[in-house]
Image (cartoon, grey):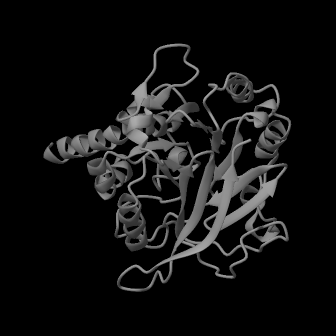
Amino acid sequence: MRFRKAMAGVLALAGALAGQLVAQNGSGRILLSVPDEQMGANPVLIGYGDMRFTNPEETKASNPKVRRWLVDRIAEEKPGAVILSGDVPWHGQEKADYAQFALETKAWRDAGIVVSAALGNHELNGLNKQQCLENWWTAFPKLRGHRWYAAQLGSKVLVLNLDSTSDLVAGSEQQKWILDELANLPKTVKFVFVNLHHPPVTDHDPGLGADHNARPNEIALAELLKASPAKKQAAFVVAAGHIHNYERFLVDGTVYLVSGGGGADPKVTKRDAGDLYRNPSDVNYHYVKFTMQGNTLHAEMVRVGNPDAAKPVWEVRDRFDVTAP
């Protein structure tokens, strides 16, 4: 009984991470919002995914030491928000995995850092999908009843948090919602982050299997973004994960990132010519830091230099800018 009460308390603390986002009751177009004052004068955003929080005794599916290093370093960056592209738990049906997430991210909660999360395939890892969703909504209570939603992070940034385990193809409910969001952008928005788990653009590697290459579901999203009139108002950044490495592309004026280095077992990437990340390193435990100055986002990929070391050494291995129209 005491264990269950303790578990409930920890899950409630996890909920507080999302609970600092303010629900809006207007049109419903933007489900969550963070005011400019909370984001700061030069807002910092962090994007990454594929942490697989779970019992730290599990060291094959996820590296608990590196996972904690990344969480603590992100807290030190003092971001206004962290954008998670999915696979927060290892097993979405296990409440204990979300409890571990809450324990390990206490530094974020203490610092008042807002979390904007997307559903990944591991959030639905379990036979009881409804229980999986219930666990996710318990961890992020402001999202209850929604599998995809918008978050406005200050007046200039809108995040469309998508569910790549659901249809994104033309005519689907989710694509209609995306089109509606982009057609009705708040006039102050200069940057649109599209946050999802499976990447629309990625290095082609048949050896990883079809699920770890660009799938028709997400390619349909890329086609939608290519033709979007909203690009005249705002710059697009697509942040994905699923592949446990780092990749960066510029396609049709949109930045496409794969940032799946949050702690899950790393995957070696066979890089295409279009991949703008030129560093030859195979293992990239990392996060991406965005700092807004005026109408420009300055981005850095911050990487763990040596995962086997006793203490973390940090390297910036990629830099790029995103400028609003």
Quick check: 247 above or below 129? below
Measured as percent of width and height from the top left, residue 103 is found at 28, 55
Q: Nearer the viewer, residue 16 or 250?
A: 250
Mark yes or no: residue 126 visible. no
Towards the viewer: 45 or 210: 45
Q: Is residue 178 visible?
A: yes
Residue at 73 percent across and 53 percent down: it is: 255
Instruction: Please give the name of the residue rendered at 69% of the width and 25% of the height, measured from the top-left corner.
Output: 177
Residue 175 image point, x, y percent: 74, 29
Position of the C terminus by quadrant:
top right
> Residue 226's image quarter?
top right
Percent coordinates x, y for residue 165 in the rendering: 65, 41
In this rendering, the answer to whether 289 lies above or below 126 is below
Q: Quadrant of residue 162?
A: top right
> Which residue appears at 47% of the width and 56% of the height?
90
Q: Position of residue 260 (x, y in %)?
A: 59, 61
